Image (cartoon, grey):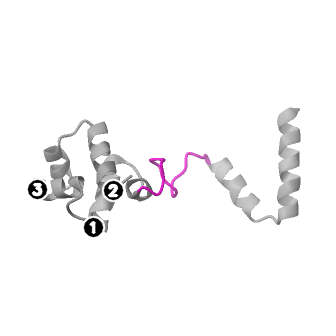
Amino acid sequence: MAVYQRIRDLREDADMTQKQAAEKLFLQLTQYRRYECGDSEVPLNIAINIAKLYNVSLDYIAGISEHKEGLTRSSLDELETQLIYEFRRLDDVCKGRLLERARFLRDM
């Protein structure tokens, strides 16, 4: 999905007009329209402001991720994040053993 389409969809999901979005982003309405229609490339600083406005990641706006929280944010809690961090530090044999144990505990 193109950047401009994501921006338009986010605005519509927020029930905002183009004028309202432009005002919140401190942009001229005509310039905002160019971004939303794909007539102008969205500069990084504007993309960052758009991401903040709609509480989504740049990954999502760029179309890299289909999840609004993107690749850099996570819905995992602190314990889950710690578990993944520790898992990644293991070698392949230990990863396999840990998965076997996790399946065993799950099936208890």
Pick whichever of labels 2 and 1 is earlier in the sequence: 2
- Mark 2 touching mark 1, by CB under 8 A? no
- Secondary structure under tag 3 reads helix
Q: Residue at x 83, y 44 (%)?
A: 102
**Residue 60 seen in render:** yes
Q: Residue at x 33, y 61 (%)?
A: 48
Question: Label 3 belongs to which residue?
Answer: 30
Q: Is residue 66 magenta?
A: yes
| Mark in front: 2 vs 1 | 2
Question: Label 2 belongs to which residue?
Answer: 3
Please count the marks in the image.
Answer: 3
Q: Residue furthest top?
A: 108
Predominant secondary structure in magenta? loop
Label 3: few (<14), some (14–19) or many (≥20) C-alpha neighbours in 10 Å: few
Which residues, given as a range, are shown in magenta?
A: 63-77
Q: Is residue 46 above or below residue 11?
A: below
Amino acid type for the residue under numbered disc 1: Pro
Question: Label 1 belongs to which residue?
Answer: 43
Q: CA distance from mark 2 to mark 1?
A: 11 Å
Q: Residue at x 37, y 48 (%)?
A: 55
Pick whichever of labels 3 and 2 is earlier in the sequence: 2
Horizontal side of residue 28 vs 69, given as left or right: left
Horizontal side of residue 56 vs 13, given as left or right: right
- Secondary structure under tag 1 reads loop
Amino acid type for the residue under numbered disc 3: Thr
Q: CA distance from mark 3 to mark 2?
A: 17 Å
Amino acid type for the residue under numbered disc 2: Val
- Secondary structure under tag 2 reads helix
